């Protein structure tokens, strides 16, 4: 679900994965610069967070 939101609304997907953090601020900045960089960052950040959770 987070990955789908990361594609449709990148900052929302990152917010659900990380909460209010520097990762969210970076994603908002990238999304403002262009939708595609925001999507790429969101998918990368969400997948890294999920990978980290599954390894614990």
Image (spheres, rainbow, N blue to C red):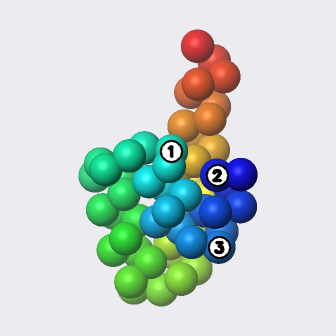
Residue 13, image quadrant: bottom right
Instruction: Point out the image quarter for the C terminus.
Output: top right
Residue 18 position within the rendered picture, expressed as x and y whole percent measured from the top left: 42, 44
**Disc 3 designates what residue?**
8
Residue 18 visible to the viewer? yes
Q: Secondary structure at mark 3?
A: helix
Circles 2 and 3: CB atoms closer than 8 Å: no
Task: State the separation of the CA atoms marked 1 and 2.
Answer: 7 Å
Residue 53, image quadrant: top right
Residue 14 position within the rendered picture, expressed as x and y whole percent measured from the top left: 48, 55
Q: Which mark is residue 17?
A: 1
Circles 1 and 2: CB atoms closer than 8 Å: yes
Q: Which mark is residue 1?
A: none
Residue positioned 57% across, 40% down in the render: 48
Task: State the separation of the CA atoms marked 2 and 3.
Answer: 10 Å
First in sequence, mark 3 or 1: give its number. 3
Mark 2 Cα-neighbour bin, 10 Å: few <14, some 14–19, many ≥20: many
Seen in the picture, residue 48 relative to 22 is either above or below; the reply is above
Task: State the separation of the CA atoms marked 3 and 1.
Answer: 15 Å
First in sequence, mark 1 or 2: give its number. 2
Q: Secondary structure at mark 1?
A: helix
Q: Secondary structure at mark 2?
A: helix
Residue 33 is left or right of residue 35, and the answer is left
Residue 26, image quadrant: bottom left
**Disc 2 designates what residue?**
2
Residue positioned 54% across, 37% down in the render: 49
Residue 1 is left or right of residue 38, and the answer is right
Mark 3 Cα-neighbour bin, 10 Å: few <14, some 14–19, many ≥20: few
Seen in the picture, residue 55 relative to 30 is either above or below; the reply is above
Residue 32 position within the rendered picture, expressed as x and y whole percent measured from the top left: 38, 83
């Amino acid at each position: 679900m987070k990955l789908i939101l990361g594609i449709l609304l990148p900052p929302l997907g990152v917010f659900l994965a990380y909460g209010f953090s520097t990762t969210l601020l970076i994603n908002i900045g990238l999304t403002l610069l262009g939708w595609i960089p925001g999507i790429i960052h969101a998918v990368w950040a969400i997948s890294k967070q999920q990978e980290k959770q599954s390894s614990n």
